[in-house]
Image: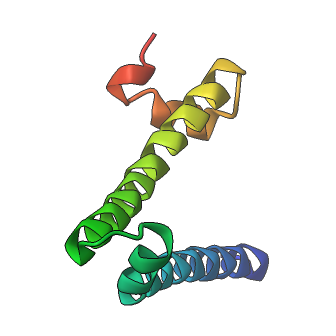
Amino acid sequence: MDPKHGSSKLATVVRVTSGNFLEMFDFFLFGFYASHIAHALFPSDNEITSLLFTFMTFGAGFLMRPWARSCSALTWIESGGGSVSSSRCRSWPWARS
């Protein structure tokens, strides 16, 4: 294995790890400040209702990420994108033509 290829793998691991860390840190911050977010964005007489609306917003954002990734992958396939992404995405049931 040449040094250039090894550093490329290391750079990929660092990028993926830092991306996952930032995503988990974002989830942590949202959970930590959920009551403050609920009070600021969903004012209500009932604190539980405000908090539930906050967590529903969080859940919608959490579910949109894979859906948006699937849509962008399908757009990539339809536009004649690369073989790696194309071959991986064609195994998805909704991507078969």
Up-down relation of residue 72 to residue 53 (above or below)? above
Residue 55 placement: quadrant:
bottom left
Kindly tell me whether residue 27 is visible in this rendering.
Answer: no
In percent of width and height, residue 16 lies at 56, 73
Which residue does the image show at 58% across and 82% down from the upper left?
18
Up-down relation of residue 7 to residue 84 (above or below)? below
What is the residue that sits farthest to the right in this orientation?
Answer: 4
Which residue does the image show at 75% across and 82% down from the upper left?
3
Which residue does the image show at 53% across and 81% down from the upper left?
17
In percent of width and height, residue 85 lies at 58, 39
Query: Left or right: where does residue 4 sit relative to residue 50?
Result: right
What is the residue that sits farthest to the front in this orientation?
Answer: 45
Residue 71 placement: quadrant:
top right
In percent of width and height, residue 70 lies at 49, 37
Up-down relation of residue 17 to residue 83 (above or below)? below
Which residue does the image show at 66% across and 30% down from the upper left?
76
Q: Quadrant of the N terminus?
A: bottom right
Residue 52 placement: quadrant:
bottom left
In percent of width and height, residue 77 lies at 61, 25
**Front-most of residues 55 and 2:** 55
Kindly tell me whether residue 61 is visible in this rendering.
Answer: yes
